[in-house]
Structures are given as C-alpha cells and as structure tokens.
Amino acid sequence: MPHDQPASAPGPAPADASDHDPAEAPFLGLLATGAAAEEYERPVLRARAGGAAAARLAALERAKLLALRVRTELEDRRRREAELSALYATAHDLAGLRDLDAVLRAIVRRARSLLGTEVAYLTLNDPAAGDTYMRVTDGSVSARFQQLRLAMGEGLGGLVAQTARPYVTDSYFHDERFRHTRTIDSGVRDEGLVAILGVPLLLGSGVIGVLFAADRRERVFEPGQVALLAAHAAHAAVAIDTANLLAETRKTLTELEAANEIIRDRSSVIERASDVHDRLTELVLRGGGVQDVADAVAEVLDGDVEFTEPGRAPAAALDRSRADGHAVRDGADWVAAVRAGGEVLGALVLSGHPALDPVDQRTLERAAMVTSLLLLARRTAGEAEQRVRGELLDDLLDAAARDPRLLRERAARVGADLDAPHVVLAARMSGAPISDGDGPPRPDGTDRRRLWSAASHLAATRHGLAAVRDGGAVLLLPLEPGGDPAHTAREIAARLGTALHVPVTVGASAPVPAPAARPAAVADAYAEARRCREALCALGRAGQGAAAADFGFLGLLLADTRDVDGFVHRTLGAVADYDARRGTELLRTLGAYFACGMSPARTKDELHVHVNTVAQRLERVGRLLGPDWQTPARALEIQLALRLHQLSAAVTRETEE
C-alpha cells in the first residue's frame, strides 16, 4: 500500500459567514438574562425602523434564529436537569420513609409535581379479589372516583395492570383502545378527567399497581414525560416493597417480643435469643454478609448453620417451610426458608439439633428473615449498578456528541476507565431471535434477561460496561496492552456459555483506543462486532467467538479498519520473512505457481529454473504455510494476499521514483 496518503480535501466552508458578525451582540445579552422569546424580535424591529440596510437586517435575522435555537437548547437542558434532580430527590425522600401510607402519599404527591398535572393517583393490585383498587389520590375531589375498583383489563388503569405497559390517552372518553365500563366512566366523569397517563409499578416481572397523572383538559403527554413517570414508578415500586418488608419485619419483631415475654422464666433461652438479635443487628449495621449471619446463628445455637441455594436445599422441607413461614424439621436437621414475598431465595440449614427449643427455632427463622433482607439489598444494589452501566453504554452507542468529561465522570462512578483501549463485543445465545423493539414480551425474553445478567456480571468484574441491544448483549471491556480482540471474544463466548449452559456466539471489534474521546467509534465498533457475530452463525460456527482477523480475507469486508497490510502479513508473513532472511524467491515462485494454474512444469518455464527447483521451493512454502496451503479456501486467501502484496510493492516503487 502507498506510504504517502493524498492530502485531505479542504473542508466545507462555514455555513454562515456572519458567525462573528456584531449583529449577534444584542441577542447574547438576551440569552444571558434569560429573556422571553418575544424579546428576540426587538433588535430586528429597531433596526428595521432605523432604516438599516438589507444586509444588516439579514444578519440580524440569522443571529436571531441562532439565538432562539440556543435558547431552546438551554431550556431543554434545564428541563432535563430539573427532571433528573426531581428523580434524585424522589429517590432520597422515598429511601427515608418507612411507613407504607407515608410512602404511598409521597409517591403520588411527587408524581403530580413532576408532571405538573391537576390530579395524580395510585392503584394497587388485590391478588385475592383479582382486581385493582384506588389506594391514594392527590388533587381528587370526587368521592366516587376515590373508591373505584377496576377489574383486570377494564379502563385504562386495568389495561396497564394487565399488560404491564404504560398507556396514555389525550381524551379518555374518545379513546376506544381499552374497555369502558359504566362504573369506571362515571367515576372519571365525576372527577372531570380528560387526559390520563398510567404507568405500571413493576416489582421483578410482576405488576403490583399503577401510578397515574391526569388533567381535566385535553393534553398530550410527551414521550419524555412518560419515561419520567415510569422512572418515578420504578423508585416507587422498590420503596413500596421495602416498606412492606419493613412492616413485616416489625410485625415479626413484635411477635418475638411477645414470645420473649411469655418465656421470661427461661432466662438462658432468652439470653441466647437476645444475643443473636444483637449480633444480627450489628451485622446488618456494619454491612455483614449472608455467611456472617450463618456463623453468628451457629455460634448462638451451638450447631452448624449453612446457607444453601434453592436448588441445593432439601426440596420437601423447603416447600413446607415456605408454606408455613416457620423452620421445619428434616431428619436431624432444621430448615428455614429464606424468602421475599413469594420468591424463595434459599434456606438456612441447622445441623446437629434434632430437638430444637421453640425460641431457638424462632431464632433460626429470624436469621432467615435477616438473610432475605441482606440478599434483597445486595440484589437491589447489583441491579442498580447494572442499570447505570447499561445506560452509560447505551449513551456511548446512541449519542456520539456526548460530553467526554461527563462520560469520564459517569464511568469513574462504576470503576471504568474510558480513556484506556477497549474492545466491543456483541453476544447472542444460539437460536435467540432478534428483538422486535417495544412489542409485547416474546417467549425468549427470559433467556435474554439471563444473557444480560451474565454479561453485566462479567462486565462488572472486568471494570467494563454491558447493555441489552438487538436481541442480545453488547459489552465494552478494557483491552490489556498487546491484548487480542479475537482471544477476548473466544474467552467471553466460553464464559457466557458456561454460565448459561447454552452456546453463546460472540463477535469482537478492532480495539477502540479511547471511547470517551471518540464516542462515535463505539457505535462503529459495535457494528463491526455484530458483523463478526453474524458471520460466525452464517459459517456454522455458532457458539464460538471471533474477530475480523479470524475470517481471513472475509475479515477485510467485516472490519471497519480494512487492515490490508495486516491481512497480507498474517497470510504470507512467514514466506516474506524467509525471503528477507535467506535472499530466496519463494514469494515470486508462489506467484508464478498460481499464475500457471498450479502446474510445476509450466512454473519452471515461467521462472527459467529446473522443475526440481520449483518442487523444492514449493515444499519449503508448505512447511512455512502449513500442509493445507493448497486447499481451495487457503489457496484463495493466499492468491488474494499475493495480489495485494504485489500491488503494494508496485505503488511503493512508483512513490519512491
């Protein structure tokens, strides 16, 4: 290839030659003072009234339009900043609340404030009745509306609760997308509501209620407002679940205190219960883990206590403990289910105590409850960090104009260094269909969530980022000095496949030197990684990992960098190096051999050497390139590399001359 590249073509002329025209001066003052939009017309009007020249008026008009665009951008940024501040304040407020009623009132009040609506309200699902009912309102004036109950699928709220998706209507009574009923319509009419936005309160994969914001006039809720209320609802769902768990804990602690009162005469037992309570409280306060809880209970109860995953605990005993809510005997052991709501997180198994005192049994149960709280806290923290990592990677992929300084600050919060070289990897489980966007959940949704979870964990352990994208996962991982993207792809494919117990196909990009400095390069690298991943599947190599360099000449088509010199070196480097060291003509012989239809007899005529010389040279080529160098696929790559090498050499000679 040529060493001297042609000079870059001159860039386009500036779009507006008056960028520094003094006509912009009056508008800068208006921007600095935050003036209203109509104030921007006055400099033009004054100039027109003063008989300014047409060129001056045109310059003022251009400056005015530019200033208005800047003003709009500033207002949008201020609005987004206010929304984010409100969400942070909401999360802080909800984190400090412990009473469920206070939590619900704070949620609804803040939702109304965030969207600036006349009314906000919240409904909760009633699993026993199979419907959803009005729980808290703010700004409501109708008693009938405040007492509404909605069957699943009825009205806008019932539809949100049933589908677990946000719904918005600009005019409730003219909207036929959901089922109207006389009871619901009467309540909405009494309240005078017209425009309604409802988002689900999601806890895990289930809906526990619906959060609404509504106005008594027609109003268009923008996508950003829908997303804002949905983010608020996500905080709210966690706060509600925490308040419920704390209420359940208070109830349990009350029961424990009553039991201690009844068995006051059994001081030794009470002393042990008090000791374990103090130990568990201290453990929670100093951030202890699950094993710490098990060790503390084992010491107090003078036995062996082990936390086991759901699949390793005695199944029958675990089911009985989950159903009863108490520790149950299993032979010579005791099993206490560690659960959160209806989800079983594991079990505490006490060995060596076939006859357990009732208070000690309750101690084991309390330890199981504390363990569940610790596990939920760890899960919540992990999910929050995964979301932060995913959002940062989404911004790198979707917003090339992001401020590098802000990207670096956000990356530092999760331990990532976006000024170091990285590699982008596109991963997908074999056979997993491509996502269809925001449509309803598809049967493979669970698999995609498992892939995202495994990829997020892997990224966190390597100080990288991970996100869900295009029916699979995308990872941005640091690349060690001298690291090989292809090796990284194979390693990640193996680790994800082991974690998920299914083949995972992974494509890798060329190294991205500094993602924070050039965010656009991340999107280009992701596109290259996807092409490599799809090429693996097309070639029947699903479940493997590869980069463009692994595909031979196909890599030239897959890679964005078009590393022709690298391809030539990988294909013919051993032969070229041999020629350079020994002064031989193996490359020339190889070119003549292919040009003569791979006929040694014709090759010796072309080179004017003996046929034995040709045979000896080809034998040496075989030892350098491998025994399969004449197979159709390898021969095609070698011929292409020869042509590119010859072209590069010819261009180099012309340049030197």
Image (cartoon, grey):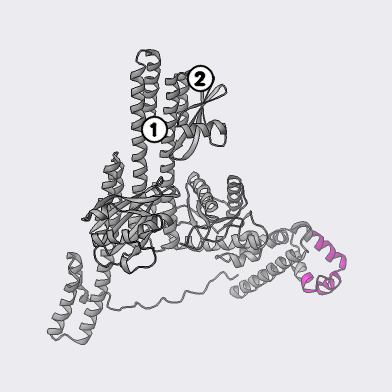
Q: Nearer the viewer, residue 481 or 445?
A: 445
Residue 528: image location, x then y, percent? 55, 63
Q: Is residue 168 positioned above or below 109 on the image? A: below
Q: Nearer the viewer, mark 1 or mark 2?
A: 2
User: Taking the image as drawn, is residue 638 in sight?
Assistant: yes
Magenta range is: 592-620
Mark pair 1, 2: CA separation: 24 Å
Dot 1 falls on a residue whose secondary structure is loop
Relative to 48, is 277 on the left or the right? right
Report which quarter residue 118 is drawn in: bottom left
Q: Please, what is the dominant secondary structure of the magenta stretch?
A: helix
User: Taking the image as drawn, is residue 170 in sight?
Assistant: no
Q: Label 2 is placed on what type of residue? A: Gly
Relative to 393, is 566 on the left or the right? right
Report which quarter residue 400 is drawn in: bottom left
Mark 1, other Cα within 10 Å: few <14 / some 14–19 / many ≥20 = few
Residue that badge 2 annotates: 303
Q: Label 1 is placed on what type of residue? A: Gly
**Quadrant (top left, top right, bottom left, bottom right) of the C terminus:** bottom right
Residue 229: image location, x then y, percent? 33, 56
Q: Is residue 143 magenta?
A: no
Q: Is residue 615 magenta?
A: yes
Please tell me the numbered disc located at residue 287.
1
Q: Nearer the viewer, residue 249 or 124?
A: 124
Mark 2, other Cα within 10 Å: few <14 / some 14–19 / many ≥20 = some
Dot 2 falls on a residue whose secondary structure is loop
Report which quarter residue 221 is drawn in: bottom left
